[in-house]
Amino acid sequence: MTSTNTSFLKGQAHLTKRHRAETRFQMMGRFAIALSLAFLIFMVGSIFWQGKSALQTHQIALKLDLSAKNVDPADIRSARFDAIIKAALRETFPDATKRAEKRKLYGLVSTDAGFELRNQIEEDPSILGGTQIIWVSASDDVDIFSKGQIDRHVPESDRRLDDQQIGWIDNLAENGAIKSVFNTKFFTNGDSREPELAGILSALVGSALSLSVCFLLSFPIGILSAVYLEEFAPKNRWSDIIEININNLAAVPSIVFGLLGLSIFLSTFGLPRSSPLVGGMVLSLMTLPTIIIASRASLRAVPPSIREAALGMGASPVQATFHHVAPLALPGMFTGAIVGMARALGDTAPLLMIGMVAFIVDVPKSFLEPATALPVQIFLWADAPERAFLEKTSAAIIVLLLFLVLMNIAAIILRKKYELRF
Amino acid sequence: MTKTPIITARDVDVFYGQKQALDKINLEIPENKVTSLIGPSGCGKTTFLRCINRMNDLVDICRVEGEIKIADQDIYAANVDVVALRSQVGMVFQKPNPFPKSIFDNVAYGPRIHGLTSSKAEMEELVEWSLIKAGLWEEVKDRLQETGTGLSGGQQQRLCIARAIAVKPRVVLMDEPCSALDPIATAIIEELIDELRKNFTIIIVTHSMQQAARVSQRTAFFHMGNLVESGPTKTIFTSPKDERTQNYITGRIG
Ligand SMILES: Nc1ncnc2c1ncn2[C@@H]1O[C@H](COP(=O)(O)OP(=O)(O)OP(=O)(O)O)[C@@H](O)[C@H]1O
Ligand SMILES: [Mg+2]
């Protein structure tokens, strides 16, 4: 009697085996999660590590002669600001005598330095009439050298700055004439051939315009198709064929939608090339199946008893759908839409096909102007030869990821807000 | 039967796909009386009930044959507006299914879509009337804006009853309305049924013989898709003609 009692409490051999199987399974699951987390952290970490330096840029202090001889206070724009800056550089480093040396010397500051100077003067004309210390942007080479990305120990012929230039930079640094500042240009400029001037604003605006077109087209069309197919369409062979085709469309590679857009929207309809309008239309082709599938799934998840309750009250099918069923499915529809849009935000291939791969300096102001998009901009920068574009690429990826995270948070908030429990 | 019946079913067959759920049902339901449908589980009571307001239209595989007339109109005729039919034939389902909206909106939904009230005050009055009739008012009068799905199972069922009578239909179909209720709430509902009978015709499915005996004037006994016997409740319970009825009400089958 006692022996049966203890074995009942301690568990028999087959129980121990079951417990072990359970532990084993849980361990495998934890290991899988740890592994994928490690990959994720490694990826995001390395991008952050490379991209964070793009948020800083360097400026050089120059002693500029802004007397009336150089700048006429009554007519600021007629002044030759580049010449003023060059003169200041020559004065600071008189050892640059030969033409080639002078050109190297002028290369220390950004090609944009003249504009910057003009803007500063226009903002605050009181600095005119004498010699002033003014900070202007350094060139990309000086910038990445100051960030430690050019190794001074490699042979002179293999680096972008020679010994003399490095000597000048060291000299400036010793005198406190180089400082690191937050890189606002990265967020306020469009693309540029000069890395220190290149920014993501035009790409960001291009993406925002395309995505809004995409949302305005695919969300209403998507949920209305889903509602019709799920709640009203007769279930027969035709609806089966439509369902299968929608599922297949969701799996079509996005470049195919790009080709479709190229031949229909551009060639047949003659809509403007490279425009966010066409970009958004192509992206909405791509997101439509996703939205329809997600919306149908969330409609199907609404308990049929709700439908019966409404219809039993004498609600018409449209009333039952729009008063009761669709509101309950809305969170799922939003989630589907945002997942689809997030995919569209990150997709490059279809945009390449319709010419949104252009070099866009100006921030697009309408849906019809040429524009590019964030992922395309990343693609372009990753392809650029200058060393300084490397950190821009990573920084742009960070911005893209940030927007993806924001969209996903929005999806979660919307779901939480509209979710109802039964 | 002295009065002409309000509902008449003639040779009603119902199929779910290949499976026949009801076989040649002939039943007359008198106006302003309570008719109870009894019978063992799966015998087709719910199926028959759902034929009367055409809820079976929603089941793709379901096919109804034969004729059902309400006030001399064939409800399966081609020109019948199902929406109008269902506003006249209300239903309380076997499982409580309140809308995931506030208690007030649950009850107000029917009157709202049918345009039964012309002012907010009138609506509030109607909601209160319905909730009092369903015996729920005292429990929820202070929390009408809370969601209906947050109520207990029995409260939800009474909310569904309030919702059904708020549109003042001619016929109320009740599918085991008291299966989730305690004896006190059951007594309230039975009292309600008795009172509603003055204005409405009621068909109630129940598994409780006592309840059938208490609330109904007529009873129909279903067995395996057949209508075995129907007649005044007293007759059915005291001197059933069919042996199956006898066995069922004395608790030997079912
Ligand atoms: N939607 C459906 N699809 C297929 N068969 C169904 C469906 N609904 C009911 N049936 C079948 O029809 C028969 C009658 O079902 P019904 O729901 O009418 O029984 P019931 O008398 O209401 O039973 P209960 O007392 O358990 O509620 C059962 O055999 C059931 O399996
Ligand atoms: Mg039933």
Image (spheres, rainbow, N blue to C red):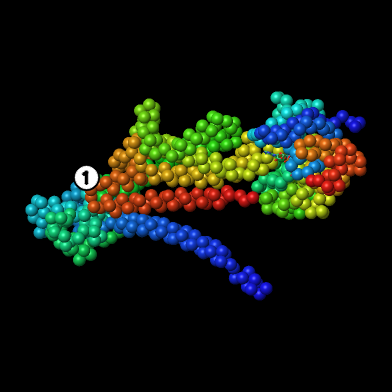
Q: Nearer the viewer, residue B78 or B205?
A: B205
* Residue A292 coordinates in the image, percent (x, y): 51, 39
- Under mark 1, the amino acid is Ser
Identity of the residue furthest to the bottom in this view:
A2
- Residue placed at 46% from the left, 60% from the top? A28
* Residue A13 coordinates in the image, percent (x, y): 56, 66
Camera sees residue A200: yes
* Residue A131 coordinates in the image, percent (x, y): 20, 58
Q: Secondary structure at mark 1?
A: helix
- Pointer 1 residue Cβ closer than 8 Å to ligand 1: no
Q: Nearer the viewer, residue A170 or A41?
A: A41
Determine whether B242 is above or below A70 in the image: above
- Residue placed at 13% from the left, 51% from the top? A103
Determine whether A165 is above or below B25 in the image: below
Host chain of mark 1: A
Q: How many marks?
A: 1
In the image: residue A329, left or right of residue B83: left
Camera sees residue A89: no
- Residue placed at 18% from the left, 63% from the top? A170
In the image: residue A161, left or right of residue B65: left
Which of the 4 quarters of the picture holds residue B245?
Answer: top right
Disc 1 residue crowd, few under 14, some 14–19, many 20+, Cα 10 Å: few
Q: Quadrant of the N terminus of chain A?
A: bottom right
Write down the residue under mark 1: A78
Which of the 4 quarters of the picture holds residue A373?
Answer: top left
